[in-house]
Image (tube, helix red, strand yellow):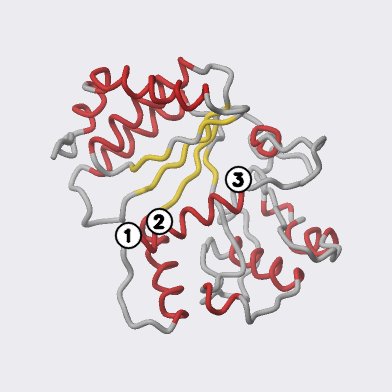
Amino acid sequence: RLGSGNNWACGYRNGSLAEENILNSLRWQLEHADRVDTILPILSLAGGTGSGLGAYVVECVRDELPRSFLLTTIVVPYTSGEVVVQNYNSLLTLSHLYHSADALFVFENDILQQYAKKLVSYSGIDRSTNIHDMNNILTRHLCSFLQPISNKPQSICEINYLLESILPHSFYKLLTLRCVPQLSDQALDFSTYKWSSLIKSLSQMYINNSYLDEGLNWSLKPNQTRTKSIGNLFLARSYDKEDIDKDLKQFFNHETFYSSFISS
């Protein structure tokens, strides 16, 4: 079993040894694709290989495909107990990715595990959560954003087009995802929701700085010191034709939700 021994410098420095094989594999995939707008690297920030080698590979892809949009997904380690040098690895990786990636989707292991525990408890199965549960949640969140937003051939659905409104400057690249409703597969088929209630819950999650829709403090009001977003993008996926613009304006059109230099 080979690795970098949790050493970021080892993974990054030896990245050149794997560069040719990795880029050849990427070129093969590109040649068999009908169209390529965006590349989606996924890497962990904790260990030496995921962080060090991952940062090196993203830089290589940037050089190889300078015009493609690089939407990099990063998994932040647990607050403690994962790797002794995880804080150093994370900072070193982010410092490199900020120059090479166009946007960074951020997922946290602590939150993914909380989410997984919640869904496992809802399923009625007596078992502990595992890495597959967490990966499943991460994948679902990514799919909620990456799936097509329209079935019309002439519509513009490129990821960079979707993100341009919430990425106004190259210094602001960190993105997070919140999804509702949060139900197990078994419960989803027997549940009904109104968009108004989902948007209200999503807004309160935002105010509470929470990624779970339970245990929220509903008395908490928007506050500039807690909400520092540059922008929000809302994607609604449903066969329902319910008008949601009014609810979005009611629950998300708060000046305190956004930084002061963003025009209303």
Task: State the mark number for residue 40.
Answer: none
Identify the secondary structure beneath mark 1: helix
The number of callouts visible is: 3
Counting residues from the start of the chain, the first of labels 1 and 3 encountered is 1
Three-letter residue code for mark 3: Leu
Instruction: From the top left corner, tell me how far across and down residue 71 is, in percent.
Output: 53, 35
Q: Residue at x 27, y 22 (%)?
A: 18
Q: Which residue is mark 3?
A: 146
Identify the secondary structure beneath mark 3: helix
- Compared to residue 41, the image places residue 246 above or below, namely below
Q: Residue at x 47, y 80 (%)?
A: 122
Instruction: From the top left corner, tell me how far across and down residue 262 is, in percent.
Output: 71, 39
Instruction: From the top left corner, tell me how far across and down residue 169 is, in percent.
Output: 62, 29
Q: Which residue is mark 2?
A: 135
Counting residues from the start of the chain, the first of labels 2 and 3 encountered is 2
Front-lying residue, 100 or 155: 155
Q: Left of 177 or right of it: where is 48? A: left
Instruction: From the top left corner, tell me how far across and down residue 65 is, in percent.
Output: 51, 18
The answer to whether the residues at label 1 and label 2 have Cβ atoms under 8 Å apart is yes
Q: CA distance from mark 1 to mark 3?
A: 22 Å
Three-letter residue code for mark 1: Ile
Q: Left of 107 or right of it: where is 259? A: right
